[in-house]
Image (spheres, coloured by chain):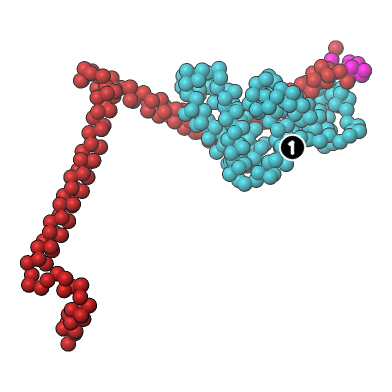
Amino acid sequence: MNPLTHTNPPMAGHPLRLEALEGQLAQRLTAHLSSGAQGLPHDITERLRFARERALASRRTVVAQEAAPVVVQAGRAAALGGPPALWLRLASAVPLVMLVAGLVFIQHHHDLQQIEAAAEIDSALLADDLPPAAYGDPGFSEFLRSGESP
Amino acid sequence: MASDKELSDCLKSVEKRAFKRTVYAVRDEDAALDIVQDAMIRLAEKYADRPAAELPLLFQRILSNATMDWFRRQKVRNAVLQNMSDFNMEGGDEFDLLESLETADGMLGAESAAETVSRSQILLLIERQIEELPARQREAFLLRYWEEFDTAETAAVMGCSEGSVKTHCSRAVHALAKALRSKGIVP
């Protein structure tokens, strides 16, 4: 007895009955879709295979990257016999400390040079015959300008 | 954690249906291949530590997200929203699914149907009608009946309630049956 051909019409509105009928129809439709999916062209299936292989290769790369630090740390621990994390942190801080020390030294050296240059200028002014106050006199400035021009 | 072989087998078992499902959504084979590949790589890279049993559901979820990302990139958001809106069945519709099923008696795909329309043409018509479904109905229908997820799993993939899944599926089946019947195919 086919359940579809012997359906009792008054039961049509019953939600469970309707759901079952919908399921049957859906299965028929998806059976067609499955047969269509199995008959995909060769180039499509090849591209899907390539995509799958690429995904697997990506996974291997990720897994290898996650595993790599463990190997390095284990090697450090074996070679140095101390806690690897602390040693690695200290070692990684050395270049930074050297950089900061270098910058401080350069700044200090630059300041010294500026001080020495200012002292030389002051000494030259004080040792000159002309008093320093003369450079603030407008008349003297005019005299210098007129003396420079032909 | 799933092994390489388990992941490969999982992807192999779903890739064709995933491709077709994406084609129905984006209607572009090249884009669908890119989306499926993107979903595969996302699954492999970000969920490599998950057990094998979780992979099919995760893949479907990633695929749905990747498809949505594609639509966003294509700047057709408005069109998507229009498709995503619920399918409105007209009031007083005389179409009766039960009647359709009763008269069908397995006709779809049977030899009697092949008398008038070839099998490939029937498939083409079905696929065309599935493409025409609103996106959410299509997704619910394909996940529930093609991927054979249960209602709860389908709801998890789609990010909605089980009630919504049932509604989408029911409307999709009715819409498909009605559309195919109007094309002369008795589902």
Q: Colour of chain B?
A: cyan
**Which percent across, then down, holds residue A94?**
22, 33
Tell me where residue A123 appears, x and y as whole percent.
9, 63
Determine whether the residue tagged by mark 1 lies in a helix, strand or loop: loop
Task: State the residue position of label 1.
Answer: B85
Whether residue B171 can be seen here: yes
Which quarter of the picture shows residue A134?
A: bottom left
Q: Inspect the image, locate mark 1, and give the three-letter code of the amino acid beneath it.
A: Ser
Please give the name of the residue rendered at 76% of the width and 35% of the height, measured from the top-left corner. B86
Magenta residues span A3-12
Q: Report the residue that reaches farthest toward the bottom.
A: A150
Q: Nearer the viewer, residue B103 or B120?
A: B103
> Is residue B180 in sight in this rendering?
no
Q: Indicate the chain coloured red by its letter.
A: A
Q: Chain of mark 1?
A: B
Residue drawn where x is 67% and y is 36% of the image: B24
Residue B62, percent from left and from top? 57, 30
**Image quadrant in which you'd find residue B134:** top right
**SS majority, magenta:** loop
Up-down relation of residue B125 to residue A142 (above or below): above
Q: Is residue B44 above or below residue A78?
A: below
In front here: A97 or B141?
A: A97
Residue most extreme to the right: A10
Question: Could you tell whether B107 is left or right of A50 in the image?
Answer: right
Q: Answer with left or right where residue A47 lies relative to residue B17.
A: left
- Residue B155 among magenta residues: no
Residue at the (81%, 29%) spot, across then down: B174
Q: Residues within 10 Å of mark 1 (few under 14, many from 20)?
A: few
Foreground of the two, B53 or A33: B53
Q: Quadrant of the C terminus of chain B?
A: top right
